[in-house]
């Protein structure tokens, strides 16, 4: 959420009915698809989320075309940054195809669909005769909701034959002006305010505008751009605001994020935090799930999300190398411990990773049998490139786990070729398990596939007893989640701690 980058799993374009190139690449671009007033956005749902595991769940409508809108369920989990603010989220978007039927849509969505179709027709006609189309969106205070009919009457003098006035809601309206270029849009808004000056609602009136083809050729985007301009004007206290298509500069937080990681590496302030993974039936600890963390002011760990990309270096390799060093030291000092350590796809592809892994194992003989390296399924999308490296890692004596299992990056035929010992089912299928028949079927299919191949399975995000018992009854071997304990910091070895203390004076 710091960088606003949005990543999609395989099959997303097909599920949404969009070309792959049109999938939103940022959270802001995705928010443009969300219909206003139809449910909490993901950001708002995260802000109001309660309960264990920082889970969120919401339902809203997405509009893909003027007459194509569908309700979706958006659920997942988020991780905080060092200040406790949401920094990274991973979840699942489920489309309710039946809700897209026009007869089932709420009246406000039907009304917007009619407006958007009219706007699109106006844009198409304007382009046919090399003209333009301006859309003005207006908003009043709630108490002025009964003023819409009077507003429509007062605006008639500035409307031509093909212009259109539409009520968007209790206190919102839209005015479509054909043959009105972007240069004339500010004057048109000022004229609109002039026609309204004698009306009691004039003092609370705010306007936002966008133009076609200057800003877009599509009606859905034109309406969203106008509404965004309106929101910006309201925030700044401006009565009129024209949409600004210039890209915004990255936020200071986004620019600062990579340097925070570098500073943490240089100061060696990254710590290892571990969460127990238990046997499904006996509930006895089987191994500890490790993750990169920072120490909080209260003394507990703050798990960190994905490592940002740097042009100058593979930052993920540096972080994973440091975590491997801490994990190897912990295994050496605790002969009975077993650790599962995740590494990123970028690290797996780096030619320096195998020598680093071999060096740490060689310096601490005997720990390899108690170390499991976790590889994300998404990193194996091109299986032939990584298969050799997986076999090389396996030859060092370590265990291999495939995380995010079920996302669809690896086919059943490819799975047979992977030298993995454990398949960790993606938590996005576990979280809605109690209410989702589809996810129950998905998990049982994944477990059956793993059992057929003779590979153990684990499930993450297990937070309640009902889910734990279901998974155990279906044959899942290991469980991990808040039900069995939260991540706890692993203390550094005394030798290393003394060396650092001496080096710092």
Image (tube, rainbow, N blue to C red):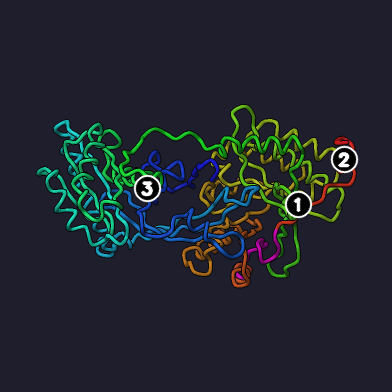
Q: Tell me residue 338's x, y (percent).
A: 78, 54
Q: CA distance from mark 1 to mark 2?
A: 26 Å
The 10 Å Cα crowd at callout 1, few under 14, some 14 to 19, many 20 or more, is many
Residue named by callout 3: 234
- Answer with left or right where residue 468 lies relative to residue 287: left
Task: Give the mark nearer the N terminus: 1 vs 2.
Answer: 1
Q: Which residues are magenta?
A: 473-486
Q: Tell which residue pokes out farthest to the left in this image.
A: 161
Q: Is residue 342 magenta?
A: no
Between label 1 and label 3, give the one nearer the viewer.
3
Q: CA distance from mark 2 to mark 3?
A: 54 Å
Identify residue for label 1.
339
Q: Between disc 1 and disc 3, whose residue precedes?
A: 3
Residue 185, how many percent across, how many down?
Answer: 24, 37
When asked about the image quadrant of residue 258, the answer is: top right
Q: Tell me the SS state at disc 1.
A: strand
For the residues carrying marks 2 and 3, which lies nearer the camera in this image? 3
Dividing the picture into quarters, in which one does residue 157 lie? top left
Q: Can you identify the residue that label 2 sits on? A: 501
Where in the figure is residue 28, as x and y percent of width and height? 44, 44
Asked if 448 appears above or below 5 in the picture, the reply is: below
Q: Earlier in the sequence, mark 2 or mark 3?
A: 3
Near-viewer residue (272 or 158): 158
Relative depth, front residue between 135 and 25:
135
Helix, strand or loop for disc 2 = helix
Disc 3, SS? helix
- Count how many numbered circles sit on residues in the image: 3
Q: Pinpoint residue 485: horizontal percent, then vertical percent.
A: 71, 63
């Amino acid at each position: 959420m710091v960088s606003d980058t949005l990543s999609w799993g395989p099959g997303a374009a097909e599920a949404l009915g969009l070309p792959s190139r049109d999938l939103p690449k940022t959270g802001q671009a995705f928010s443009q698809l969300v219909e206003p007033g139809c449910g909490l956005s993901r950001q708002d749902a995260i802000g109001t989320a309660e309960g264990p595991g920082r889970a969120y769940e919401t339902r809203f409508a997405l509009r893909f075309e003027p007459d194509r809108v569908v309700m979706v369920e958006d659920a997942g989990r988020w991780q905080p940054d060092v200040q406790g603010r949401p920094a990274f989220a991973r979840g699942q978007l489920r489309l309710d195809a039946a809700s897209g039927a026009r007869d089932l849509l709420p009246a406000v969505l039907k009304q917007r669909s009619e407006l958007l179709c009219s706007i699109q027709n106006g844009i198409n006609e304007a382009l046919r005769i090399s003209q333009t189309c301006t859309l003005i969106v207006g908003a009043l205070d709630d108490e002025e909701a009964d003023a819409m009919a009077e507003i429509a009457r007062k605006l008639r003098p500035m409307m031509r034959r093909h212009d259109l006035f539409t009520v968007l809601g209790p206190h919102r309206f839209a005015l479509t002006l054909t043959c009105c270029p972007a240069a004339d849009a500010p004057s048109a808004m000022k004229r609109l305010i002039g026609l309204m000056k004698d009306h009691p609602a004039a003092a609370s009136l705010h306007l936002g505008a966008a133009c076609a083809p200057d800003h877009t050729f599509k009606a859905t985007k034109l309406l969203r751009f106008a509404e965004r301009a309106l929101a910006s004007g309201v925030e700044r206290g401006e009565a009129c605001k024209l949409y600004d298509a210039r890209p915004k500069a990255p936020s200071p937080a986004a620019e600062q994020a990579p340097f925070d990681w570098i500073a943490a590496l240089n100061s060696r302030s990254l710590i290892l935090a571990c969460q127990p993974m238990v046997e499904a039936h006996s509930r006895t600890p089987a191994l500890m799930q490790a993750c990169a963390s920072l120490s909080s002011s209260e003394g507990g760990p703050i798990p960190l999300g994905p490592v940002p990309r740097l042009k100058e270096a593979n930052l993920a390799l540096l972080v994973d190398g440091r975590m491997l060093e801490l994990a190897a030291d912990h295994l050496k000092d605790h002969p009975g411990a077993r650790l599962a350590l995740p590494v990123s796809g970028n690290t797996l592809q780096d030619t320096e990773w195998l020598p680093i892994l071999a060096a740490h194992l060689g310096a601490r003989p005997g720990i390899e049998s108690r170390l499991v390296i976790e590889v994300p399924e998404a990193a194996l999308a091109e299986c032939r490139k990584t298969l050799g490296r997986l076999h090389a890692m396996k030859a060092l004596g370590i265990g291999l786990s495939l995380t995010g299992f079920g996302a669809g990056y690896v086919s059943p035929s490819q799975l047979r070729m992977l030298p993995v010992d454990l398949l960790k089912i993606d938590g996005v299928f576990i979280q809605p398990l109690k209410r989702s028949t589809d996810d129950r079927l998905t998990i049982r299919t994944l477990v059956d596939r793993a059992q057929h191949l003779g590979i153990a399975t684990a499930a993450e995000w297990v937070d309640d007893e009902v889910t734990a018992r279901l998974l155990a009854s279906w044959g899942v071997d290991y469980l991990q989640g808040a039900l069995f304990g939260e991540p706890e910091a692993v203390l550094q070895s005394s030798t290393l701690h003394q060396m650092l203390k001496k080096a710092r004076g």
